[in-house]
Image (cartoon, helix red, strand yellow):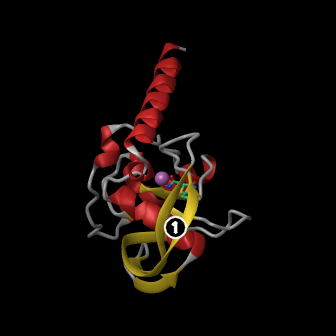
């Protein structure tokens, strides 16, 4: 297992459109293990493969307080069901920035596990917010995209400045 580097906004590679997984092999198992290790180390509650520069439709997540309930979603698909909810979102690719985003409240999730078994479940609350946030990553989207242009510019400038300071150090 290995911790992988997480891309930081406004890195263009975060705009990659991820492709569905077609082979449920050892390479996939290694990717999932590395993503889990990277998410736990960050620490974060979710991670999409695009964030570690792998354009495949793979998501890991752990919403438990104990950090002992890893969930893996391969080729996740979301069907909006009902309602809307607002949540103060953060993102490992947008460090230090939090902003309220409106999402669908209740969704149906269809996905596969690392072995290729198919599942379907309904979600609301944090699971619903998080899977919508992660599937956005797989489509090249970041939560900052939902903010006003002014706020987007502010976030971009802040992170580019921090990047330059880190490079100078
Ligand atoms: O760790 C994370 N926390 C979080 C908080 C509110 C809404 C979404 C998230 S996901 C984020 C990890 C991440 O960047 N996943 O892509
Ligand atoms: Ni994110």
Residue picked out by circle 1: 129
Asked if the beta carbon under badge 1 is closer than 8 A to the nearest atom of ligand 1, the reply is yes
Position of the C terminus by quadrant: top right
Compare residues 167 and 107 and report the one nearer the observer.
107
Q: Judging from the image, what secondary structure is the residue with disc 1 in? A: helix
Any part of residue 67 in sight: yes
Residue 29 visible in the displayed image? no
Please state the horizontal and vertical placement of residue 150, each as a whole percent of the image: 41, 38
Q: Position of residue 134 (x, y in %)?
A: 44, 61
55 or 83, nearer to the observer: 83
How many numbered discs, if any?
Answer: 1
The residue at the point 57 percent across, 47 percent down is: 98
The percent coordinates of residue 130 (x first, y second) are: 51, 65
Residue at x-position 48% and y-position 31%: 159
Up the image or down, 98 lies above or below 58; here it is above
Left or right of residue 33, residue 96 in this image: right
What residue sits 40% from the left and 35% below the top? 153
Examine the image and state in which quarter residue 89 appears: bottom right
x and y percentages locating residue 44 in the rendered image: 59, 53
112 shown above or below 133 = below
Residue 148 placement, left or right of 17: right
Name the residue at 50% across, 13% down. 168
Residue 157 versus residue 52 in the image, above or below? above
Which residue extends farthest right?
66
Q: Residues within 10 Å of mark 1 (few under 14, many from 20)?
A: many
Work out whether residue 163 or residue 28 is closer to the camera in this orientation and state it. 163
């Amino acid at each position: 297992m290995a911790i992988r580097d997480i891309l930081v906004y406004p890195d263009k590679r975060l705009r990659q459109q991820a492709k569905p997984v077609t082979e449920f092999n050892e390479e996939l198992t290694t990717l999932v293990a590395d993503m889990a290790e990277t998410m736990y180390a960050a620490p974060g509650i979710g991670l999409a493969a695009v964030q570690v520069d792998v354009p495949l439709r793979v998501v890991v997540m752990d919403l438990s307080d104990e950090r002992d309930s890893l969930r893996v979603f391969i080729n996740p698909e979301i069907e909006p069901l009902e309602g809307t909810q607002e949540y103060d979102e953060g993102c490992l690719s947008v460090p230090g920035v939090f902003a309220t985003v409106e999402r669908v409240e209740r969704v149906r999730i269809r996905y596969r596990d690392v072995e290729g078994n198919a599942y379907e479940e309904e979600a609301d609350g944090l699971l619903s917010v998080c899977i919508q946030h992660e599937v956005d990553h797989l489509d090249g989207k970041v939560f900052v995209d939902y903010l006003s242009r002014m706020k987007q510019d502010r976030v971009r400038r802040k992170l580019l400045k921090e990047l330059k300071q880190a490079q100078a150090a």
